Image (spheres, helix red, strand yellow):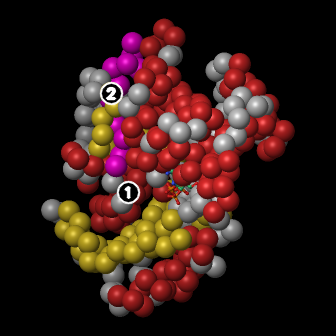
Amino acid sequence: MLILAGDVGGTSTRLAYFEADAAGLTVLAHAQYKSAAHGSLTEMLRHFSLQHGIICERACLGIAGPIIDGRVRTPNLPWTIDSVDLAQTLGLAQLRLINDLEANTYGIAALKQDDLFTLNAGTPHPDATIAVVSAGTGLGESLAYWDGGTHRPLPSEAGHADFAARNDLEAELLLYLQAKHGRVSYERVLSGPGLHDIYRFLRDRRYFEEQAAVVDAMASLDPPAVITRAALKDSCPMCVKAVDMFIAIYGAEAGNAALRFLATGGVYLGGGIAPKILDLLKGATFMVAFTAKGRLSPLVQSIPVHVILNEDTALLGAGRAAFYTP
Ligand SMILES: Nc1ncnc2c1ncn2[C@@H]1O[C@H](COP(=O)(O)OP(=O)(O)OP(=O)(O)O)[C@@H](O)[C@H]1O
């Protein structure tokens, strides 16, 4: 069966044609687009389909945003996408829209061992609920329950739940972000723009001297990438602190997801940021925050935690969703 699959994120969109059968997915064509460089998703899909001229039987797109009745307004892009309109415009017999984290979660079953890095081995329960927490342009979260044969993902907008500060510094950060945004969700902190804001908070509160080299680099390069690269090189104390706060809050929220869903099957960190800061995630900060859950700490300590390293996981998941669940 020929399938068109997509992972539509606030920064990047990945598209692929897959040949799918019971053995799995074979990639026939693959492309990555900068989402904001295109006026619409239709335009991007037209470009991809004209390039390859493949007529497919099913299509599934994972989209960063809440899908209601086959329709979504993307929070981090100025797009409204309707599955019926899009299918008609593109001449597709069947098009399914799912949340990008749902796609990410479907994709986990297609991963190989070296597509994951394990931060905590824990006690695996392969047939228990799993949770996925993915920081990228935004923060996506989902869970998947075991139906007796496979994990079935459920979408959520948990990344937009209220940010909970855990100490004085995070409380100050909350006030700083409230002054900027009014309401502060976890996504306002655990995302590329969120990491940049943590850095600005530390700078404006004069926790450290700002370094000219970092300011210069930020003028021409993506600020969150500048911050994490400087932190990895240990060349900028403010960047080190900003990434450490980010990782602590990521650990705390991943632990919250583990508790909310009793995800003893494991917590997976998806999204584009985690693989880029893997060396720092391996330090103590993440797991200390993940497991600091009071009387439930021993339970959380037993939960496996994995970083998803394969950037095509949501794309593979959209392909699997189209094949297995029409
Ligand atoms: N090296 C890096 N360190 C930290 N953040 C980075 C780095 N490189 C890019 N980013 C940030 O990661 C974000 C993009 O994440 P990702 O690659 O997951 O994109 P996406 O899939 O389009 O996002 P989403 O699915 O959340 O809409 C941007 O905010 C960008 O600034």
Q: Amino acid at mark 1?
A: Glu
Compared to residue 89, the image places residue 112 above or below, namely: above
- Which residue is at the front of the view, 219 or 281? 219
- Secondary structure under tag 1 reads loop
- Which residue is at the front of the view, 177 or 146? 177
Mark 2 crowd level (few <14, some 14–19, many ≥20, 10 Å Cα)? some
The quarter of the picture where the C terminus appears is: bottom left
Magenta stretch, residue numbers? 298-309
Q: Is residue 139 magenta?
A: no
Residue 120's mark? 2
For the image shown, how many numbered marks are present on the structure? 2
The quarter of the picture where the N terminus appears is: bottom left
User: Does residue 56 appear in the picture of this structure?
Assistant: yes
Instruction: Tell me: is circle 1 under 8 Å from ligand 1.
Output: yes
Q: Is residue 306 magenta?
A: yes
Q: Of marks 2 and 1, which one's residue comes earlier in the chain?
A: 2
- Secondary structure under tag 2 reads strand
Percent x, y of residue 201? 73, 36
Percent x, y of residue 56? 33, 81
Disc 1: which residue: 311
User: Does residue 192 appear in the picture of this structure?
Assistant: no
**Residue positioned 48% across, 57% down in the render:** 100
**Residue positioned 46% across, 20% down in the render:** 288
Residue 91's mark? none
**Residue positioned 22% across, 70% down in the render:** 26
